[in-house]
Image: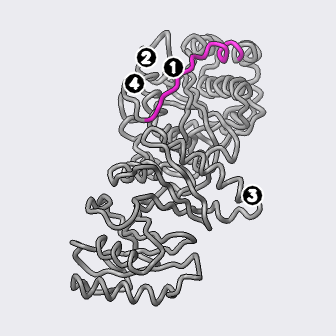
């Protein structure tokens, strides 16, 4: 496998004879056959939207790669664009490249400029998307590699080089770059529909949201606060989490439901050890009402089998019984270490670890039921008239629109 230099060094300030741009490599999008055009069009729209706060860009689609260009681009702007695009689902690599003329002299100048000052062994990897170019990929590798070695005295090492100089010959131009930034992979957000995430303030639900966005779902978020019996801390925390996750899709919406009085009703109904499961069923029912209003086709939770005592297979089955919409559980087979590792990577772990008063722990019994019976839960819900209660809770939601990068809230 080709070794890529992923060091975060910026595009060189010393200009080469060309235009700075961002060259994007796509992942499984290119495998979509007859639907590929739809996936690529959505992905291009998502890239443009992500870049909008930085600069207006043109996204040019060619043979499995995207070229992102902007007028009057400078290297600092290109750096910012490349970094921002790495959060766009569907992108595997973002390369900060130089777009140069389709002639050997331009390629030579760009290659020598990019390799100036680098220390260590290197390799040249060329690719001709346009086979009309007079040199083959192998010939171009040898020619440019020889020039760099002669000029700077760097050794060539084809296996596991410290630096990789890439040259891609396209229809109208050549792209020259060294290194790249890894992207998220997956599918473009919006290609798989819309769903609603039940967002707690914990570690799990933000990771669940991320994993489903990566599979092409556009998500909204529903948070249950303990108000009026708790303070607003959990709402601030949910807001901060959604704001961080917004970098993956843009336009995120957070809906907050004051859930404290409903919990009190469940406690007073004699639910006892079934209180936790009854609360979660009511949350799912409320989520279903809201999801249908938002044209969502599924609910998403951070459940992981066996992670806490109430997350047994029997209880999960009892939760599924509460709603007609499918419940997606992308973490169901993961352990806590795996989930925390992913939370750390997407930068939600620090926020999730902030202290707050979780509504789920309010009025909860000392011991939760691990083998909840659906008939017992239905009896409790009949006494509470949960259908009406869920409608009331869904009608009480407050909508917020956290925006990634906005620290004014």
For marks 3 and 1, give the CA distance. Answer: 41 Å
Residue 76, position as x, y percentages in the image? 32, 50
Residue 129 location, quadrant: bottom right
Camera-side residue: 51 or 316? 51
For marks 2 and 4, give the CA distance. Answer: 9 Å
Q: Which residue is mark 3?
A: 35
Residue 371, position as x, y percentages in the image? 66, 36
- Image color mode: one colour
Name the element at disc 2: loop
Q: Which residue is mark 4?
A: 356
Name the element at disc 4: loop
Membership of 357 in magenta stretch: no
Q: Nearer the viewer, mark 3 or mark 4?
A: 3
For marks 2 and 3, give the CA distance. Answer: 45 Å
Task: Give the mark nearer the N terminus: 3 vs 4.
Answer: 3
Task: Give the mark nearer the N terminus: 1 vs 2.
Answer: 1
Residue 374, position as x, y percentages in the image? 74, 30
Question: In the drawing, what numbered circle is on residue 225?
Answer: 1
Label count reads: 4
Task: Give the mark nearer the N terminus: 2 vs 3.
Answer: 3
Question: In the drawing, what numbered circle is on residue 91?
Answer: none
**Is any atom of residue 336 visible in this view?**
no
- Circle 3 packing at 10 Å, graded few (<14), some (14-19), many (20+), is few
Q: Which residue is mark 2?
A: 232
For marks 4 and 1, give the CA distance. Answer: 10 Å
Residue 62 vs 307, above or below: the answer is: below
């Amino acid at each position: 496998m080709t070794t890529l230099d992923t060091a975060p060094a910026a595009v060189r300030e010393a200009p080469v004879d060309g235009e700075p741009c961002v060259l994007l490599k796509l992942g499984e999008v290119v495998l979509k056959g007859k639907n590929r055009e739809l996936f690529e069009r959505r992905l291009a729209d998502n890239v443009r939207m992500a870049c909008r706060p930085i600069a207006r860009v043109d996204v040019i689609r060619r043979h499995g790669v995207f070229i992102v260009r902007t007028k009057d681009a400078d290297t600092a702007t290109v750096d910012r664009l490349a970094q921002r695009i790495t959060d766009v689902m569907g992108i595997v690599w973002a390369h900060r490249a130089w777009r140069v003329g389709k002639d050997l002299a331009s390629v030579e100048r760009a290659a020598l400029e990019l390799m100036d000052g680098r220390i260590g062994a290197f390799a040249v990897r060329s690719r001709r998307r346009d086979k009309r170019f007079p040199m083959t990929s192998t010939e171009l590798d040898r020619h440019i590699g020889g020039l760099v070695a002669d000029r700077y005295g760097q050794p060539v090492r084809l296996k596991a080089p410290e630096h990789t100089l890439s040259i891609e010959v396209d229809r109208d131009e050549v792209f020259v770059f060294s290194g790249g930034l890894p992207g998220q992979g997956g599918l473009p957000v919006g290609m798989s529909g819309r769903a609603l995430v039940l967002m707690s303030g914990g570690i799990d639900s933000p990771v669940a949201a991320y994993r489903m966005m990566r599979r092409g779902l556009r998500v909204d978020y529903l948070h249950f606060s303990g108000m009026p019996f708790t303070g607003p801390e959990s709402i601030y925390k949910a807001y901060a989490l959604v704001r961080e996750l917004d970098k993956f899709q843009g336009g995120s919406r957070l809906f907050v439901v004051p859930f404290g009085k409903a919990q009190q009703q469940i406690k007073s109904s004699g639910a006892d050890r079934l209180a936790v499961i009854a609360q979660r069923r009511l949350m799912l029912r409320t989520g279903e009402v809201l999801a249908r209003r938002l044209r969502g086709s599924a609910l998403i939770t951070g459940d992981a089998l066996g992670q806490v005592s109430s997350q047994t297979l029997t209880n999960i089955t009892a939760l599924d019984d509460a709603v007609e919409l499918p419940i997606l559980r992308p973490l169901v087979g993961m352990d806590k270490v795996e989930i925390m590792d992913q939370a750390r990577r997407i930068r939600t772990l620090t926020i999730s670890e902030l202290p707050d008063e979780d509504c789920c722990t309010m009025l909860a019994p000392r011991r939760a039921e691990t083998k909840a019976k659906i008939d017992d839960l239905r009896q409790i819900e009949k006494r509470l008239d949960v259908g009406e209660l869920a409608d009331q809770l869904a009608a009480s939601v407050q909508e917020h629109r956290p925006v990634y990068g906005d620290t004014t809230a």
